[in-house]
Image: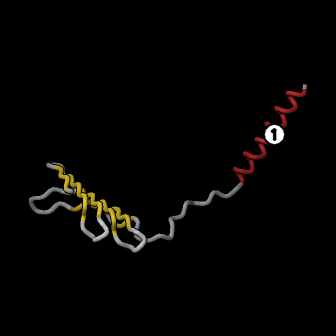
Amino acid sequence: MRREAVLGALTAINLVLLAGMGLTQILPAKAQDSPGILRGSGLQIVDSQGRVRSSISVLPAKAGEAETVLFRLIAENGQPSVKISATTASAGLSF
C-alpha cells in the first residue's frame, strides 16, 4: 500500500512538472552580440584585437580554375602559417 502511494505521488509530481514545462513559452535562440564570426560564404575566427586568426573560404570558380575551398591558420603577424586548399581536381597543403 505504501509503495503504491509513493509511486502515485511521484507520477503526480511528474505530471505537474510536464504540464508546467508545456505551458511555459519557449523562446527562440538568439545570436551572440559578438560580430564578425560568420561572414558571407566563409567562416573567420578572430582574436581579442579583431585580427583574423583562422578562416575557411569558398572561392568562386574563375576562367580555367575550379571552385576552391581554402582553410588558413594565421600567425600573429598576419602571415598564413598553414594553408589547406581543395578543388574537384586537386588538393594542397602548405606550411
Name the residue: 15% across, 49% down: 90
The foreground one among 22 and 77 is 77
Judged from this view, the residue extending furthest toward the bottom is 49
Q: Indicate the secondary structure of the residue bearing disc 1.
A: helix
Q: Is residue 44 rendered to the left or right of residue 33? A: left
Give the labeled residue for mark 1.
Answer: 12
Name the residue: 81% across, 39% down: 12
Could you say which quadrant of the image residue 6 lies in? top right
User: Which residue type carries mark 1?
Assistant: Ala
The foreground one among 43 and 16 is 43
Residue 11: % across, % down:
79, 36
Residue 84: % across, % down:
23, 54
Residue 14: % across, % down:
76, 41
Q: Residues within 10 Å of mark 1 (few under 14, many from 20)?
A: few
Name the residue: 78% across, 45% down: 16
Q: Is residue 95 rendered to the left or right of residue 44? A: left
Query: Can you say which quadrant of the picture contains the C terminus?
Result: bottom left
Judged from this view, the residue extending furthest toward the left is 64
Query: Can you say which quadrant of the picture contains the N terminus?
Result: top right
The foreground one among 90 and 26 is 90
Residue 41: % across, % down:
31, 63
Q: Is residue 12 rendered to the left or right of residue 47? A: right
Judged from this view, the residue extending furthest toward the right is 1
Q: Specify the color scheme.
A: secondary structure
**Residue 47 against residue 66 in the figure, above or below:** below
